[in-house]
Each structure stands twice: as C-alpha cells, then as structure tokens.
Image (cartoon, helix red, strand yellow):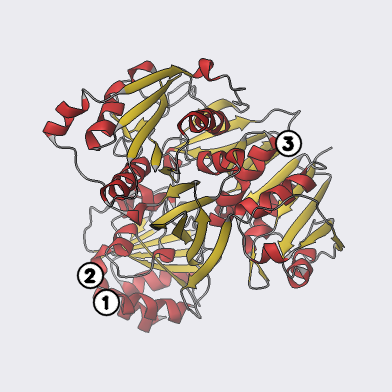
C-alpha cells in the first residue's frame, strides 16, 4: 500500500498552490493515504490551509525556530526522519522543491524522479528531458522510497473540501547552522501570481525597454492577468528575473496565455506548452511562436495591445 | 582555496533533439556535443574568483566516456589549472555522480564546489544538492551572485518569489543560474596551452562507491505536439474568438 508524504511549500503563512497540485499527483496513483508535512517556525496557519485540501488524510506539523526560512539542509534531515514511514515523498518542482527534494533523496539513499508529469502506476512515471523535447517513462524500484518533484503545470490543484486532522511531530535530527538566511527581495505586486494565474500576458524582446512594458502591464490589469516575460526581456533588464517563463524560468499552465513580441524560442515554448489557449502577437509572421499558437495576429504590438485592452 | 567545478558534456543546446523511432533513446550519433551551458557559467565564476585572488586553483571534473577528452581540454583551455576525468561508459544518475564527486572531494579538499544548476540533457537538477547533503556541507542553488569573504560565501539565489540571499560557511556547494556571468570565449593559443595541462583519469569503478542508478527508462517518446491554430486578421476577430471560448467576457 502506498503512503504518500507531500512537503508543503509556504511563505509568510500562506500555503503555495503548488502543494495542492502535488496532492493531485498523489491521488493519481491511488495512494492509500496522503499526508502533508509542514515545517515552519509557526506552522498552524499553513497547516489549517493544507487540512482543507481534498484527499489529504492528515497534516503533520514540525515547529522549530530553525524552520523559519526554507533552508534545504536544515529541512531535509527532519523530513528524512519522518519519511521513513512512507513509500512516496513528493514536493513541487518549484525552486523550493528543486532545492530541497534531492537532499531528502540523498539522505534516504534513493534516486529522485524530477518533474513528474504523469503517473503510469505507483512506481512508473513520465517526465520531460531535453527541455521537454523528449518524454521518458521512468520506473523506480518498488522496494525503495520514491522521492519526486512534481511538475506543477501538469497537475490541477486539488479541491478545498477536505478536513484533515492536524498533528504535531517532533524530530530528533541534528540541524546544521552552516547556512544563514539573509534576505528575500520580493517583487511587490498586486497582480496574480505568475505560477498559479489563470491568465498571463507576457512580453518579449520586442518591447524594447522597461518603460514600454507598461502596455503589457496595462493589458494584464484589464484581464486580471499575471505578467510574464521571455528570457530575452529579462536579460535585457526590462522586468525582474522572477517573471521569466520557460525552461529555466517558470513553467506555467494558465487557461489563457498572451505572448506579445515573443519569437518563441524552444526554451520559452517549454514553459507554456500546457497552457489552455495561446495567443501570439508578433510583427514577424514567420516567428516560431505562431506554430504553437491557437490564435495568431501579425502586427505591431504597440498598436494591438492597447486596442485589445480597449476592446475587452 | 581550491575550487572543483562540475563540467558535464551534453548534447549542444542548439541541437534539435529527435527521439529514436523505436523509443529506445534520443539520437545522439553524430550530433554536436558541448559543455553544459550552466557548467560553463560555473567554470567562468571559478576563474573569476581565481583572478580576484580568492582561489588558487581551479579543477574541472567530468564524468563521462573515454572520448570526453576534447571536452575536458576545452575546460582547460578556458582556464582551469587541471582536470579530473572520471571514466564511465554508462550514463550515470545524479546520486551516483554525487557519490563519485564526494570521493574526489575527500582527496582534493576543495574550499568550494561549483556546478550548473542543472544539465540540459536530463534536466534533473539534483547532483549539487545531493553532493552537499552527502558531504554534510551547505548548499546554495540557482546562484545569480557570489561574494566570498573570509570563510563565508554570500550567495544571491534566483527563487520563484524573487531574489534570496544566504550566507553559507565554506566549504560549500554552489549551483549556478544563467545570470551569474557570461562565460569567456576560448582563444586559440589557450587551446595549445591546454594540451600541456595535467589531466588525471580515474575509472568510476575504482572510486569504490556504491552505484545508485536505481531508475530505469522504459520508453522515450516525442512530446505531444500542440496543433497549429488559426491566424486572425485583427483585434476584433481575436476578441470574438476569445469570447467564443469563454476566455474573456
């Protein structure tokens, strides 16, 4: 019988929706039970949110002042201790999960399956390699714990009609002090979060400057959408790095993705291929983005975006 | 301080990857191989730390088949002092690579280990984190800035929420992201010079580690293709199409 443990991702007392997507993944192979583990200096609020996730049997809290910031080498020994009672340990393939999960796998002496995108059985999964240019079916040994990161764009968020029990656990693992949190510089924005937004408007190199990105923000606000960008736009300094969509940025699956002035490099397309509907606006009719767009419009984005905003 | 740099050879990032028709792998015969782009950034950072006088020696580490030598020479031509080639014909998985790397660390006693945040072939993004764990040392993944002062590295990390800064005690493992630096180009005279730089080879089997290639791959498949949609002629037509799909009201 499979018993799945999901490592909750959270920040400032809020559960990240990536956790709900990991729960969906665990339900896909009919795990006999799914528990969520919250490590924090003050886990209660996050635990209450996790307890509402459909399909979760219980939420386990590990409270420790050292868990105030998600430092992988501090969290991993605590998780490895609790993970011994489970067959599967999942985290999201966000920067949080990518940083943390391999440490747990190393402590357990097992391989990790990265970016799990579909489930064939409890020990067989599909995942992308080569920036999504090939999809492999990976089989993990049945006699070892499966540690995996879950490709969040491939999974819907679990519902919120659960009422799991919340428990407290204490772990005896010795925690290192060799790593110290200094700061987190967050982009301040009232806009939806890029990774979980249902609509995203992205701009590329053709925007030409940080000032010109205003047309993208303006349309996004009209739509209630998050703002994204291509790597070229980020490298050029038009927008902060956390807005990057693509293989090395965020991999997203909004219902609507509008790409303005983005040519569509393979690395960018990797980040959006699970989007529901892709709209491409580009003055180059040969741009590769049109090969994947549901709706393409050739023209000057500086005319089209304001016109679109007005028409909505 | 000595710096070890993970320097993997992968299919060049410009190559369009094709899955073999029988699903047994991807086509790698005759395709261009290059250094993993993230590892190039790691090596560049190590060289800059040495240029600043913060490191005395930069050693590139490659785990791969016997024909990886030209690739390793590139690392030496870029400026590494010497190289260690762990020879293995089979592709190894991250936990095996981390265990092998730890053996080299025990011998070399580096003050810092740098490597790319992921290799662009298997996209696993695991080896650095596993190595730090097995070594019992700090990790700072996805670095976009590294400042070393005394026995500490202050590392800025590209995380989903923005930029996180950590202080890590050295020795440590740092995995690097795209925006850390721009790697230098290799100059012809440096290629000549690299030929006389020391390259140590050791068979993976001789490192005395327990291999941990637990995962097996049963099928390689091309990704599901998005079908090409339609071109609309103007904004009005686009809005009508989006309304029709219920995406805008």
Neighbor class of circle 1 (other Cα within 10 Å; few <14, some 14-19, many 20+) is: some
- Please tell me which residue is depicted at 42% across the width and 65% down the height of the picture: A243
Answer left or right for A305 relative to A272.
left
Q: Quadrant of the C terminus of chain A?
A: bottom left
- Callouts 1 and 3 in the same chain: yes
Q: Does the residue at mark 1 contact the one at mark 2 (Cβ under 8 Å)?
A: yes
Whether residue B247 is visible here, answered yes or no, is no
Q: Nearer the viewer, residue A45 or A103?
A: A103
Q: Is residue B102 left or right of residue A30?
A: left
Residue located beneath label 2 in the image:
A208
Residue B80 position in % (x across, y down): 29, 35
What SS does tag 2 mark? loop
Q: CA distance from mark 3 to mark 2?
A: 49 Å
Up the image or down, B166 lies above or below A114; here it is: below
Q: Which residue is mark 3?
A: A145
Local SS, label 3: loop
* Dot 3 or dot 2, earlier in sequence: 3
Question: Are both tags, 1 and 2, on one chain?
Answer: yes
Q: Nearer the viewer, residue B138 or B170?
A: B170
Q: Name the residue at the left extreme.
A: B189
Q: Residue at x 65, y 51 (%)?
A: A91
Which residue has dot 1 on it? A212
Q: From what the image shows, is residue A259 above or below residue B202? A: below
């Amino acid at each position: 019988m499979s018993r799945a443990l999901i490592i909750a991702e959270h920040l400032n007392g809020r559960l990240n929706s990536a956790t709900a997507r990991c729960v969906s993944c665990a339900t896909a192979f009919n795990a006999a039970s799914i528990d969520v583990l919250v490590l924090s200096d003050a886990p209660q609020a996050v635990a209450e949110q996790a307890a509402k996730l459909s399909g979760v049997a219980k939420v386990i809290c590990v409270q420790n002042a050292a868990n105030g910031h998600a430092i992988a080498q501090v969290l991993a020994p605590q998780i490895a201790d609790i993970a011994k009672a489970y067959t599967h340990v999942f985290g999201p393939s966000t920067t949080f999960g990518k940083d943390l999960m391999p440490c747990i796998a190393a402590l357990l002496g097992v391989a990790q399956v990265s970016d799990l995108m579909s489930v064939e059985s409890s020990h067989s999964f599909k995942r992308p390699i080569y920036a999504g240019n090939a999809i492999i079916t990976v089989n993990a040994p049945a006699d070892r714990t499966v540690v995996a990161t879950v490709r969040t764009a491939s999974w819907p968020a679990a519902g919120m009609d659960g009422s799991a029990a919340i428990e407290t656990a204490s772990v005896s693992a010795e925690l290192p002090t060799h790593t110290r949190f200094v700061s987190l510089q967050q982009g301040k924005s009232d806009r939806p979060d890029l990774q979980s937004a249902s609509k995203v408007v992205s701009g590329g190199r053709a925007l030409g400057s940080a000032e010109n990105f205003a047309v993208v923000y303006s349309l996004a606000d009209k739509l209630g959408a998050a703002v994204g960008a291509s790597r070229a736009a980020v490298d050029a300094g038009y927008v902060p790095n956390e807005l990057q969509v693509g293989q090395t940025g965020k991999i997203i699956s909004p219902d609507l993705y509008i790409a303005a002035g983005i040519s569509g490099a393979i690395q960018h397309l990797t980040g959006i291929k699970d989007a529901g509907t892709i709209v491409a606006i580009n003055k180059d009719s040969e741009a590769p983005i049109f090969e994947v767009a549901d709706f393409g419009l050739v023209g000057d984005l500086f005319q089209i975006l304001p016109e679109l905003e007005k028409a909505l | 301080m000595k710096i070890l740099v993970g320097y993997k050879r992968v299919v060049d990032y410009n190559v369009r990857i094709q899955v073999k028709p029988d699903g047994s792998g991807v086509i790698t015969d005759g395709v261009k191989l290059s250094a993993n782009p993230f590892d190039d950034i790691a090596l560049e950072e190590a060289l800059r730390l040495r240029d600043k006088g913060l490191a005395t020696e930069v050693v590139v580490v490659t785990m791969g088949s016997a024909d990886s030598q030209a690739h390793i020479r590139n690392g030496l031509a870029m400026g590494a002092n010497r190289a260690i080639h762990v020879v293995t014909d089979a592709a190894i998985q991250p936990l095996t690579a981390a265990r092998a790397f730890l053996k080299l660390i025990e011998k070399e006693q580096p003050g810092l280990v740098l490597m790319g945040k992921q290799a662009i072939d298997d996209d696993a993004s695991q080896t650095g984190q596993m190595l730090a764990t097995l070594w019992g040392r700090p990790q700072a993944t996805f670095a976009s800035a590294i400042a070393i002062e005394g026995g500490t590295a202050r590392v800025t990390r590209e995380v989903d929420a923005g930029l996180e800064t950590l202080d890590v005690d050295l020795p440590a493992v740092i995995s690097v992201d795209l925006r850390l630096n721009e790697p230098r180009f290799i100059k012809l005279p440096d290629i000549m010079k690299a030929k006389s730089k020391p390259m140590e080879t050791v068979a993976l089997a001789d490192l005395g580690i327990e291999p941990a290639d637990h995962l097996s791959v049963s099928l390689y498949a091309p990704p599901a293709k998005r079908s090409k949609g339609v071109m609309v002629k103007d904004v009005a037509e686009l809005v009508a199409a989006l309304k029709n799909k219920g995406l805008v009201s």
